Image (tube, rainbow, N blue to C red):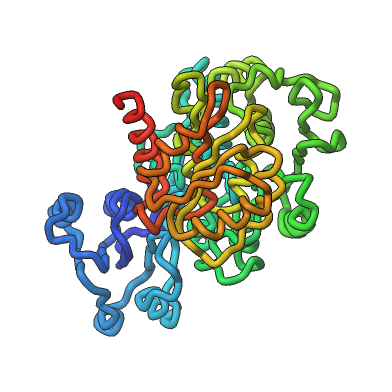
């Protein structure tokens, strides 16, 4: 870890505990900072805050003490990425011209290991996991390791102390995190895709959302690389205008891109066959696209075809992201709880050739589901719907001509009904197309319960 002086003797307010707040607090203490941590939740019985208190961190919980800014001067506010900028503590800090940053800003600036960054509306976690596996296979030949960190669930601050110059950090960056960085400079940055109607409750407008994503490349220069989606022309134009890095592209169909999906192989434009598509374990053309991004990053970081072929032929999917659960009575069952928006379901539903029994539903964000009608018509034989959006989704299913439309209240009720509607040879797909917050705290919790309910089928 680099011993930088940026935060030495600085008075820093950390807003929000969570995984990243806890780990960045410990990192900042080692960098010589004086810390105050604030969380609106009551942390009086939290073991992590007790540990931080013993290390000298002042903890204020249960409310936001906006008046603290009038009592003392802070040099930085480190914000949990999920906390909106309308939070009164953030608004006060910005009014006082106190820099508001997020954990990646600090952690990446002390990393001895080189790093690459990946963002996107959908597919970024799978892309990060694929890249990590490819690069870990490559770096292990010389005693190095690749670490998957960031929005994937492992704070960067937890890893930077042990990662050396022999290693590589593969960083998943959310739009929330990217809003709080000013000078990260990845050797390779990639944007898998950008879709509308994603996190607009946070960013307010699509343009704001795009601008947040583009921050991934804002500090790159001509010695760095930027990986762009050749098929999203409107976004590509903005990316090319923003980046100073050398650009490489990927495409599902266009053979003029640097990397593309061929008839039998994942290929590059020099007619090089990199990986046989039939050897890739994860289903769906969108996952082939994720593989292309991972290949582009890994090639630039020194991996060869053997590293790529090994990783892509053994990876069976990220948890909750079109994750294969089991085959039960000749039904293949998949958990796609990360399908928190319509666009994610749009790429999941066409991933199978077999007839599908679909389970969907969740938080009502005010969207209609008519864009799913053609996919329902082509791929879905029966559908089970639950949650706040069940009637809206049922309307789309009726428009698609689906005969078996079952409406229930909960996911627990939906699972056995989906099994009853299925036949040998079918796929049972849980791809909600909605956020989880009507019935679950997170999409991970929702997916874990889905897997639990599936396993309960075998006991009945």
Q: Quadrant of the C terminus?
A: top left
Q: Quadrant of the N terminus?
A: top left
| Placement of 341 over or under 62, stated as above or below | above
Rendered location of residue 209, percent (x, y) = 60, 63
Residue 428 vs residue 7, the one in the foreground? 428
Residue 442 vs residue 403, the one in the foreground? 403
Q: Residue at x 72, y 47 (%)?
A: 374
Residue most extreme to the front: 403
Rendered location of residue 340, percent (x, y) = 51, 51
Q: Residue at x 47, y 47 (%)?
A: 108
Q: Give the quarter of the image for residue 271.
A: top right
Q: Give left or right: position of 11 versus 406.
A: left
Q: Residue at x 50, y 43 (%)?
A: 359
Regarding residue 166, the answer to whether it shows in the image is no
Rendered location of residue 431, percent (x, y) = 52, 43
Rendered location of residue 148, percent (x, y) = 47, 36
Q: Give left or right: position of 74 versus 279.
A: left
| Placement of 430 over or under 325, stated as above or below | below
Regarding residue 215, the answer to whether it shows in the image is yes
Q: How many marks?
A: 0
């Amino acid at each position: 870890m680099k011993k930088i002086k940026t935060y030495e003797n600085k008075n820093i307010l950390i807003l929000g505990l969570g995984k990243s707040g806890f780990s960045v607090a410990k990192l900042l203490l080692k960098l010589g900072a004086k810390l105050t941590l604030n969380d609106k939740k009551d942390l009086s019985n939290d073991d992590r805050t007790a540990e931080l208190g013993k290390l000298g961190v002042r903890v204020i919980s249960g409310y936001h003490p906006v008046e603290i800014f009038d009592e003392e001067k802070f040099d930085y506010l480190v914000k949990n990425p999920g906390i909106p900028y309308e939070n009164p503590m953030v608004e006060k800090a910005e009014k006082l011209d106190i820099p508001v940053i997020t954990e990646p800003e600090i952690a990446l600036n002390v990393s001895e290991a080189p790093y690459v960054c990946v963002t996107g509306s959908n597919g970024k976690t799978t892309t990060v996991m694929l890249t990590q596996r490819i690069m870990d296979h490559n770096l292990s030949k010389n005693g190095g390791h690749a670490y998957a960190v960031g929005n994937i669930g492992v704070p960067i601050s937890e890893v930077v102390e042990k990662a050396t110059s022999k290693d590589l950090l593969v960083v998943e960056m959310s739009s929330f995190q990217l809003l709080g960085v000013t000078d990260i400079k990845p050797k390779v940055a990639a944007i898998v895709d950008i879709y509308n109607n994603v996190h607009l409750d946070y960013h307010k407008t699509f343009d704001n959302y795009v601008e947040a994503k583009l921050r991934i490349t804002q500090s790159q220069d001509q010695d760095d690389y930027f990986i762009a989606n050749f098929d999203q022309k409107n976004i590509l134009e903005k990316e090319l205008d923003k980046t100073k890095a050398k650009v490489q592209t990927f495409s599902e169909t266009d053979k003029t891109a640097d990397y593309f999906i061929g008839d039998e192989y994942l290929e590059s434009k020099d007619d090089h066959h990199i990986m046989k598509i039939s050897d890739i374990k994860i289903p769906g053309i969108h996952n082939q696209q994720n593989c292309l991004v991972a290949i582009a990053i890994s090639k630039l970081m020194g991996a060869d075809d053997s590293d790529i072929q090994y990783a892509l032929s053994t990876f069976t999917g990220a948890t909750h992201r079109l994750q294969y659960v089991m085959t039960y009575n000749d039904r293949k069952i998949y958990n796609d709880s990360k399908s928190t928006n319509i666009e994610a379901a749009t790429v999941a539903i066409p991933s199978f050739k077999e007839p599908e029994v679909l389970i969907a539903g969740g938080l009502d964000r005010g969207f209609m589901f008519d864009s799913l009608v053609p996919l329902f018509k082509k791929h879905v034989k029966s559908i089970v719907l639950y949650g706040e959006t069940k009637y809206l989704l049922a309307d789309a299913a009726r428009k698609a001509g689906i005969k078996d439309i079952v409406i229930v209240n909960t996911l627990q009720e939906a699972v056995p009904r989906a099994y009853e509607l299925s036949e040998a040879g079918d796929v049972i797909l849980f791809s909600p197309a909605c956020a989880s917050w009507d019935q679950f705290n997170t999409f991970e919790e929702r997916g874990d319960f889905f897997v639990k309910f599936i396993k309960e089928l075998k006991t009945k």
